[in-house]
Amino acid sequence: MKGFLTKDIRRRVLVVDDERINRELLGAMLSQTFEIAFASNGKEAMAALEEGDYSLILLDLLMPVMDGFEVIERCQADEHLRRIPIIVMTSEKSAEVRSIRMGAADFITKPYDMPEVILARCERIIEMSEDKSIIRSTERDKVSGLYTRGYFFAYLQRRQPASDIHMDALVLNIDRFHMINELYGRDEGDRILRRFGQLIAALLPGIHGIACRSDSDTFFVYCERQEDYEPMIRQMQERLVKDSGLRSLHIRAGIYSCDDESTDPERWFSRAKGACDRIRGQYGALTARYDSEQYARTLYHERLIGDVASAIRNRDFVVYYQPKYNIKGDRPILASAEALIRWIHPELGFISPGDFIPLFEHNGLIRQVDDYVWHEAALQIGRWREQYGVTIPVSVNVSRVDVFDPQLEDKLIGIVKACSLRPDDLIPEITESAYSDSADRLIEVVSSLRKSGFRIAMDDFGSGYSSLNMLTEIPFDVLKIDMRFIRRMLIDDKNLRLVKLVMDIAAFLGVPVVAEGVEEKEQLDALKEMGCDIVQGYYFSPPLPADRFEELIKKEYPRPDSADSAEARHVINSEK
Ligand code: C2E
Ligand code: MG
Ligand code: MG
């Protein structure tokens, strides 16, 4: 800051003294540095102050017409003039004290014997007052009247933690505030933010806190711990609704207990914000507390999302194959496989799809991941065909998100062509619950894929609520019964009857049934008796890496010309 006074602009100083000699003396001392104006009494001084801007007033106290005390008083009463520092010039100790109490910044004792001291004092006082006004303009947020984010955190960094008082970090947010801006305009939005700021400011003395507007409609409060914030937030919401006339206004608050004083305050508020985001759009919920498990989960998810690109590049996604056996004949025969993704993360280790598929479905990354898996599976079918002279059909999972991808069909056709396969060698499995997202779109996609020669398996059949409608509307080729029915089939008679019913429906529709999750011999026998065609499950094998799956192929198709092999080769088309 030092030095900016003398450089850019010449500051104006008003010298007020009824004695000409004093005016001239001061003028001579200061006119090299400042632009000087003169007044010979208080009245003239007030008139001059009304006319122009001054950076400093040098004020004599004893003057005719209007004395210096009255000038100080009038300046203090004026919003604008109050900011101009006043140095009083006096020879009386008692007057010095009185004028400083009234608001003068400093005093100079008459007679003026050391010009350089006087000049230095004037410069310092102006500098201090300008620093203060810079701070004033940066510490307050213009819209809400609360502190700015920068000042707020600067304050928190400097604070002296009191060991016996527990503090909390609160993040307050107006739900879907952008809608208010869009519907009613920015001015109305600002008006609501200002009112929200006032309501927060009104709370602060009671909770011994400070607050800032962090950005847009997000406010931070640092305050002494309260037992229950809910009534406070509810009251604030009611006031805001009443004052704005907008009934749809909802406030939510995230709370973090700042018990770890060593942590960076920014982190407290990012945690409180995490809690606040958790209840976004849940209108019943006004407050949420940060919970460390949820936070760890969020971090973990962010990590996974961030690592997808490198996982694809480094081939950390590995496709496993789970065999499906045809159980129609005397002995079960390896008929096909399902491709199931695994993530072998270089640092986090083995991650199962249940941990990342729903996450990637949520943000659309699943499309890249699925594309990768379909390619890998198609390449693998080609490799096995070359090595063993047999085409093992492999089913691949098609996420409900892929169903909305306009490129889906082109992608699948491209993959099949690139690997010289037939479309019915790669079987898309679409989960039944995709039907509830958009029945029309699903019907359209399935019909179109079938026209291109693909066979479609309906996955997890029975897990959704739309099963019966779906059966009549979607032209699928294979029905996979949800494994929950299989698991409970022998414990609960209702489930057994349901499985039978599904078999009957499939027979009526003329499509084969795949039973998933078969773990026990009894389940296998029961399914066989009911006329189930194909079985997949731990009873036969868990999903295996490609090289281990290969051992199963070798066992099943030892020589292209053996009798067993011929039977198997016939059966392999059972899903087609
Ligand atoms: P899904 O398609 O229904 O796959 C069957 C799941 O059942 C697999 O779980 C498989 O390992 C498991 N399973 C198979 N036999 C048994 C058994 O006898 N007992 C039990 N308890 N489980 C068995 P996984 O591999 O963990 O996959 C879970 C789900 O993740 C899959 O369910 C599928 O919806 C999804 N998924 C897996 N890979 C992909 C993929 O590449 N893309 C997409 N979009 N989803 C995938
Ligand atoms: Mg599946
Ligand atoms: Mg399934």
Image: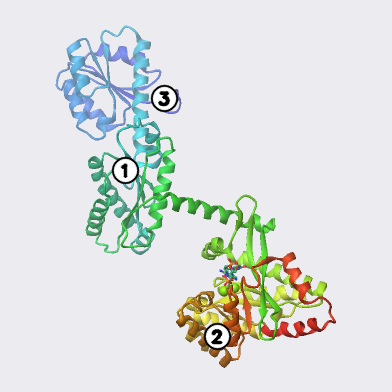
Counting from the top left corner in percent of width and height, residue 243 is at 22, 57
Asked whether residue 478 appears in the rendered view, the answer is: no
Work out whether residue 83 or residue 555 is closer to the camera in this orientation and state it: 555
> What is the distance, in whole Å, between disc 2 and disc 3 at their CAs?
80 Å
Question: Mark 3 or mark 1, which is nearer the start of the sequence?
Answer: 3
Mark 1: few, some, or many residues within 10 Å (few <14, many ≥20)? many
Q: Is residue 553 left or right of residue 123?
A: right
The kind of residue on which mark 3 rests is Leu
Mark 2: few, some, or many residues within 10 Å (few <14, many ≥20)? some
Residue 146's label in the rendered image is 1
* Tags 2 and 3 touching, CB below 8 Å: no
Residue 474's label in the rendered image is 2
Say if 98 sits above or below 466 in the image: above
Work out whether residue 412 or residue 187 is closer to the camera in this orientation and state it: 412
Between marks 1 and 3 in the image, the one whose residue lies nearer the viewer = 1
Counting from the top left corner in percent of width and height, residue 508 is at 56, 93
Work out whether residue 61 or residue 127 is closer to the camera in this orientation and state it: 127
Asked whether residue 290 appears in the rendered view, the answer is: yes
Say if 21 sits above or below 132 in the image: above
Ligand 1 lies in quarter: bottom right
Q: Is residue 55 left or right of residue 74?
A: right
Mark 2 falls on what kind of element?
A: loop
Counting from the top left corner in percent of width and height, residue 154 is at 40, 35
User: Which residue does the numbered mark 3 point to in the structure image?
Assistant: 5
Residue extending furthest toward the front: 522
Residue 459's label in the rendered image is none
Between marks 2 and 3 in the image, the one whose residue lies nearer the viewer = 2
Res. 325 image quadrant: bottom right
Q: How is the image coloured?
A: rainbow
The kind of residue on which mark 2 rests is Ile
Mark 3 falls on what kind of element?
A: helix
